[in-house]
Amino acid sequence: MHKTPIAILISGRGSNMRALIAACARPDYPARIALVLSNNPDAPGLDVARKAGLAAQAIDHRAYPRDREGHERALDAALRAAGVEYICLAGYMRLLTPFLTTAWKERMLNIHPSLLPAFPGLHTHERALENGTRIHGCTVHWVTEGMDEGPVIGQAAVPVLDGDTPDTLAARVLEQEHRLYPAALRRVLAPATTPAPDAAASLLAV
């Protein structure tokens, strides 16, 4: 089947990147990873990608002091040189400027550890617990200029249990992130061939 070339942008260990690598390795999955790109040359995920045989590159944002757009133009050039058609943000810890969000409109996805629009931004698990939330989860959404404001592609929910800490809640949400991101990307790239959710992914919603 046709495999759409994608890029994964990371800043750290790339946990969700690993889930996408595993999905793209399947012959029936509609994407292949053309490039793993980071703003951090020391990101552990770069070594993970290289060990998986993937092209991996760092463009250090610190080389562009007070010039976010200049850094993004360098990212954009690398993405286009690699023939990328879609971007998956996977723990990419930089606020994006309108340059990149416009250049890749409706071709850039992000995963966020809450059921948006609840708890955009950071420290989502702590905030969910402080708020007394009983259902938490994660969201894959299109990236727009507003932080965590883009249209939802898919969500997965987990219950908040008595005695949960931010760490225990984060661990259960992360399990769902690893299921949700590949499923949501498949829906974007090959909606006609997306299988019905199995029991493990029964909480997916579009």
Image (cartoon, rainbow, N blue to C red):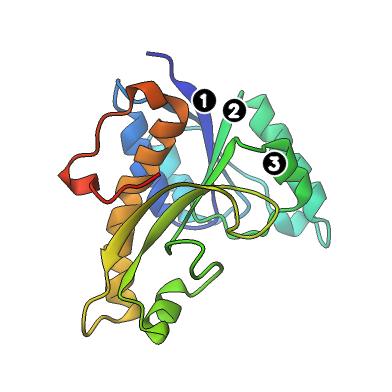
Q: On screen, 104 above or below 164? A: above
Residue under numbered circle 3: 75
Query: What is the distance, in whole Å, between disc 1 and disc 3 at their CAs?
Result: 16 Å
Residue under numbered circle 1: 5
Query: Left or right of 136: which side holds 60?
Result: right
Q: Residue lying furthest front in this view?
A: 206
Question: Which x, y percent locates residue 129?
Answer: 37, 82
Q: Residue at x 45, y 80 (%)?
A: 127
Q: Secondary structure at mark 1?
A: strand
Image quarter of residue 186: top left
- Marks 1 and 2 close (CB-CB < 8 Å): yes
Residue under numbered circle 2: 84
Q: Is residue 53 visible?
A: no
* Kind of residue at disc 3: Leu
Q: On screen, 93 above or below 206? A: below
* Kind of residue at disc 1: Pro
Q: Which numbered disc flags the more N-terminal residue, 1 or 3?
A: 1
Res 32 label? none
- Nearest to viewer (mark 3 / mark 2): 2
11, 58: nearer the viewer: 11
Q: On screen, 3 above or below 51? A: above
Q: Residue at x 51, y 63 (%)?
A: 117
Q: Secondary structure at mark 2?
A: loop
* Kind of residue at disc 2: Val
Q: Quadrant of the C terminus?
A: top left
Q: Residue at x 58, y 60 (%)?
A: 93
Q: Secondary structure at mark 3?
A: helix
